[in-house]
Amino acid sequence: MENQFLNRLISDADDMVKNIMASALEFASSYEKMRLANDAMRAAKSVYDDAEHEVTYTIMFDNEQYHTAKNAETRKALLDRAIDQSRRTGSLAKSWRALQTATEYYERMQSDHIAADAHFKAIRVAGQLVDGSLRAATVDAYRISIKEG
């Protein structure tokens, strides 16, 4: 009876090691995906920023309405409206959509990584519990074998 219990604990410990390894691989994979998504988001942001600077330059230096605006607030509103319109249908549309897509993907990968981290921590704690049970059972089995032997 005692031997069956110990064998069951050993089997549970073996399963737990496999679960920990699988969870660690999942965690590492989610980290790598998040890192790559962050790189893609940064690249998309750089492309978008360059394109926005071109639009801003064009508005500030080539737009008659901008130059005849009465104050900085009016000029800022004109620039904001032009950038917004360009994001929807103009020269910024493609890079803006790419940035939005890359940002959303990064946020999903970040969320997946957080979930993988929580899963890994939970599996690790369960492994520690199995480890403690196995150690206690081993000590008990050793004590019994000394008494019998």
Image: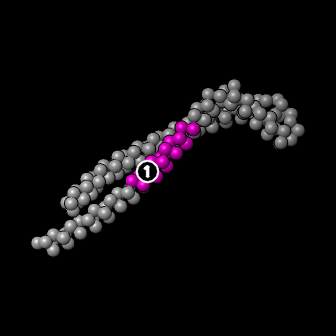
Quadrant assignment, res 86: top right
The answer to whether one can see residue 17 in this image is: no
Q: Name the residue under label 1.
A: 119
- From the viewer's side, name the closer residue of 87 and 3: 3
Is 85 placed above or below 137 here?
Answer: above
Taking the image as shown, residue 91 lies to the left or right of residue 59, namely left
Magenta highlight range: 104-123
- Residue shown at 32% from the left, 59% from the top: 130
Is 61 placed above or below 35 here?
Answer: above
Q: Residue furthest left?
A: 149
- Residue shown at 49% from the left, 49% from the top: 114
Which image quadrant: the C terminus? bottom left
Quadrant assignment, res 2: bottom left
Q: What residue type is labelled 1?
A: His
Q: Is the magenta stretch mostly helix, strand or loop?
A: helix
- Residue shown at 76% from the left, 36% from the top: 80
- From the viewer's side, name the closer residue of 141 and 15: 141
